[in-house]
Amino acid sequence: MPNPPPASKRFTLHDTRHNVLMQVADFSCICLSVAVVVSMYPAAKMLAVVHNSAAALGGVLFCLAATAHGLYKIRWLRRPAADEVKAILVCWAWTVAPLMTLGFATKMLTNFSRVATVSWILLAPSLIVIYRLLARAGSQAGRSAPRRAAIAGVTPFGEHIHDTIQRAPDLGLSMVGLFDDRSSARDESMGMRLTSAGSFQQLVAAARDGTVDVVYVALPLRAEDRVRELILRLQDTTASVYIAFDFDSLAGSCNRQISHVGNMPVVPLLAPAQPSVRTQALTFVRALTGPRTAPRDLPRTAAPRTSKSFRRVPGITPEPRIDLPRPRTDS
């Protein structure tokens, strides 16, 4: 029996299928909206081929904009629906703007009815939003009961994880509480809003009993020994354990995309600074419009005058030339 592929490869294949299906669905919604508009306005039926070509081009542009915006990632199903709707509208704006510019430049807008064009601009994103909301509702309906999550460590980052889970019910998680071995007086001195629901021993017992399904370890990096000890104690449970480090505390604005060195995942914190788009554009414009000096136009530097007997050096007085008398030759 062949071995199953690793988890990272299974996730990649699942993510790829999701991307393809969403792209096909978006493209179909844009083409369907054009078909609806053409059927509603008799004047548009005369130029159905032109409208279909515009729809195909719009579908391609929207898929490109959505891909660049990351709208086809599975993570959007775990984010609030309002964020997804805003992203769809932004991608649609980036789709309509090039189409309108191309239409003005080629004078093709005269072939389109204004009413039909406005109707299509409003109908296409509406269909995309409706089907995505239905897909989100179906995904939530087919999901089992929410998993119970606990956070190990009453820290500022632990509170941030707690607030994130509470604000995003689409994650399918319900909070049990924060657990820590340190005293509550320490939490009050640090100004923590949330208090500990128990010690690490109680957290391990809850994980063994099945009361906790997911554990997020939010201890600081300097607590390496405590993290290792807690993970060893949670190995005998059925709970899923995740280490959540606060990378923002290490580097303010850094690239936190996960990279791989072989099969080992790494998180880049500091990367070489890349020039901004504005800097690259200015450099390109200066290279095109900057002054160009031909070699023949370069100023010629006069060669220093030298005497046949000596070369003048600044700061050094040359010795006087002594002319010896030539011997006379008697004829």
Image (cartoon, rainbow, N blue to C red):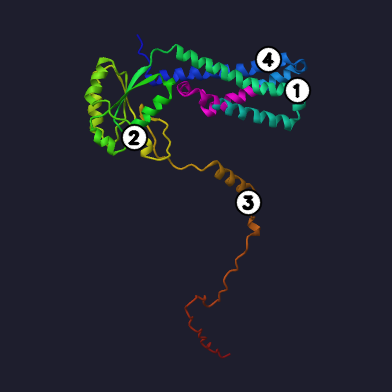
**Residue 40 seen from this side:** yes
Q: Is residue 235 magenta?
A: no
Q: CA distance from mark 1 to mark 2?
A: 57 Å
Q: Which quadrant would residue 67 be assigned to in this image? A: top right
In primary-sequence order, the first of circles 3 and 2 is 2
Q: Label 2, secondary structure: give it.
A: helix
Total tally of numbered discs in the picture: 4
Q: Label 3, secondary structure: give it.
A: loop
Give the number of the disc on residue 82. Answer: none
Q: Which residue is mark 3?
A: 290
Q: Which residue is mark 2?
A: 156
Q: Which residue is mark 1?
A: 113
Q: Which residue is mark 4?
A: 36
Image quadrant occupied by the C terminus: bottom right
Q: Position of residue 220 (x, y in %)?
A: 30, 35
Kind of residue at disc 3: Gly
Kind of residue at disc 4: Val
In primary-sequence order, the first of circles 3 and 4 is 4
Q: CA distance from mark 4 to mark 1?
A: 14 Å
